[in-house]
Amino acid sequence: MPIRLSMVAWLLLAGLPLSAARAEHAKINLDVTTSRGQVTAHVDQTPPATGKAPRPVIRARVNERVRVQWMFTNVYPHKTLENVVLHFFVVREEKAGQETLPDLSSDDAAEVETALEMTFKPGTKAGQKSTIRLDTPGVYLIRIESRETQSDHEHFAAVDLIVEEPKTP
């Protein structure tokens, strides 16, 4: 009996490094709220650049207040993520669910764009709350992404926002 228990314990411990190697380094939540409701996007990862999960879609009217809140958490239990860049942007796209990221290379490409660089100790969080108003109808990508995490992949959360003209009476 003791041999069986120790063998089971050894097998369980032997599996720990393998599962720890697969552990994710970040948790990201992105909440977008309009007069029509709220959607939440959870962490996805690159590659591919647009991730593996479909993006939630929410609608708003031109010049409506759109509330955006995101939170990034280092979920490694014992590893510090140094000099991580968190890049947040709102950019026009051709259609909801677009499979390529819009080009951000020109200075005026994004409607909103912020970035911060931070070192995240285990369990450390950073986030942002904003209110935006878009004055042009169209489809917009709202995205928060990690960069420079010294990993083979990065994390992000994204939502498609469809901005429509107000209804006329």
Image (cartoon, rainbow, N blue to C red):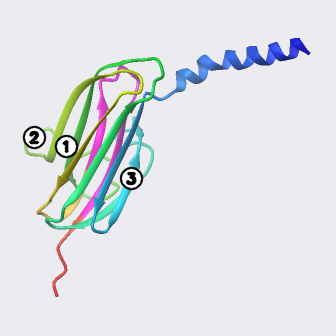
Q: Position of residue 31 (x, y in %)?
A: 33, 51
The residue carrying pointer 2 sits among few (fewer than 14), some (14 to 19) or many (20 or more) residues within 10 Å by Cα, namely: few
Name which of mark 3 and mark 1 comes first in the sequence: 3
Residue 6, above or below 99? above
The residue carrying pointer 1 sits among few (fewer than 14), some (14 to 19) or many (20 or more) residues within 10 Å by Cα, namely: few
Quarter of the rendering occupied by the N terminus: top right
Q: Secondary structure at mark 2?
A: loop
Seen at 35% across and 39% down, the residue is 156
Q: Nearer the viewer, mark 3 or mark 1?
A: 3
Q: Which mark is residue 106?
A: 2
Q: Quadrant of residue 16?
A: top right
Task: Determine which residue is flagged by label 1.
Answer: 103
In the drawing, does residue 40 fall left or right of residue 164? right
What's the distance in space between the residues labelled 3 and 1, CA to CA? Answer: 24 Å
Q: Which mark is residue 40?
A: 3
- Give yes or no for contact between labels 1 and 2 (Cβ–Cβ under 8 Å): yes
What's the distance in space between the residues labelled 1 and 2, CA to CA? Answer: 8 Å
Quarter of the rendering occupied by the C terminus: bottom left
Range shown magenta: 142-162
Q: Position of residue 58 (x, y in %)?
A: 32, 62
Q: Residue furthest left?
A: 107
Seen at 24% across and 46% down, the residue is 129
Disc 3 residue type (three-letter): Thr
Disc 2 residue type (three-letter): Ser
